[in-house]
Image (tube, helix red, strand yellow):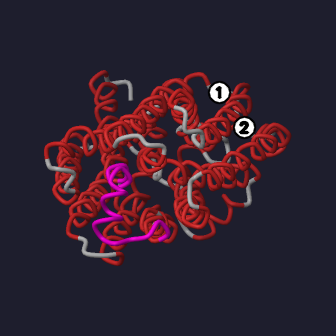
Amino acid sequence: MSDPSRLQRRWVVLVGAAVVYASFALITASTGALVPELRDGLGLSNTEMGMILGAWQFVYIGSSIPAGRLFDRFGARRAILFASLLIALSGALRPLATGFWSLAAAVGLMGIGAPIISIGAPAVAANLFEQESRRLAVGIYSTAPSIGSIVGLMVPTSVLGPLLNDSWRPILAIQAGLAGLAVIFWFLVSGGLDRQMKPGAGLALSSYRSLASLPVMRFVLAMAAINFFFVHGIGQWLVDILASHGWSKAEAGTGAAWAAAVGMVGSFVLPRLANERRRRLIMVGALTVGALGALALANPSTGVLLTALTLNGSTKIALMPLLVMIMMDHPDVGPTRIAAASGLYFSIAQLGGVAGPAFTGAASEASGGFALPLVVFAATMVVVAGFVSLRYERFVGAGASAS
């Protein structure tokens, strides 16, 4: 990796992976931004809408471990290309939906490609970059979902919505076209990538069992599932939560995009600050801030809601890069096992990703509003913050390498 042109090219490849990651978030966010239109246009209940929003996470659970094997067998370039095509296809099928099952199937299709992206981005960062530059690489690809979310939230609500009379079908079709551009970009910049990737450690089931037996991985997996529970449970309903307080569609989309922008800054800055000594403190702080943000989202005051969006955004993306860095830097995981570890990580995390949106939909329908699910999310974050404060060293401290 000493050749200057190769050193420069690795950043271009990383940006390519980040663009694909952003397209995944764009398709997810654009569907969340159009929840009221989809629900009314297809005659869906909140419970059904929550199940649809969690459909791709449900598929993800079963496909993430096979995705790790596919990534290892076919290489990063072809695997990520295949995943980006599936994400664009999922986006293209959504405007053709006629009811619950057709929309759920279109959303669920993304769950086949998404785990390859989730595995591929950290694998590219871990293999192309040494430890001292790896934090910056993680920060760059971790900002990609926030950028995609901002576009996916603001374009449908503030740009295309007024132009197309809030007609959700053409809006979703245009967003799918943007995802298609990401496919082309990755194909153009990723040539020669597989020659720079280190050989994987093997992705047999025994490899996953071996990883799952590590104390550090048990901690990471538990945190991942809980994190995705409240991140997806709040994030995919955020536009509707703000609309329930009387915000217009454009205001709600802009507010949700602001939360994503705050998260983007945090996901870029935090990995560079998060050496081993600081990680527990940052996790506890992020969870505490997130709990306050969840509670504040239940308050109809505009000033409180703006504060809530800032707090929610600051914690939304904070935990994932920290947990990925723990895996990358741990001597029992590291670059050679990061594909398998990431597959296991995201398969468990998406248990929370399925439960969060479904819980929000069912609880809001049963209680007549979003206060109940928001209080539950806040309480969950407080309990987890206490656990991290007391048990972090037991699970992570003994084996982690200094960063």
- The answer to whether the residues at label 1 and label 2 have Cβ atoms under 8 Å apart is yes
Q: Quadrant of the N terminus?
A: top left
Residue kind at label 2, given as amino acid type: Ala
Give the alpha-carbon distance from disc 1 to disc 2, as whole Å: 9 Å
* Residue 44, magenta (yes or no): yes
Tell me: residue 242, above or below residue 4: below
Tell me: residue 352, above or below residue 4: below
Q: Which mark is residue 403?
A: 1
Q: Residue at x 56, y 36 (%)?
A: 312
Q: Which is nearer the eye, 132 or 220?
A: 220
Q: Which residue is drawn at 57% across and 40% down?
A: 297
Classify residue 38 as left or right of residue 93.
right
Query: What range is drawn magenta here?
Result: 28-47
**Which residue has dot 2 on it?**
400
- Give the image location of residue 201, x and y in percent: 54, 56
Q: Which is nearer the eye, 292 or 313?
A: 292
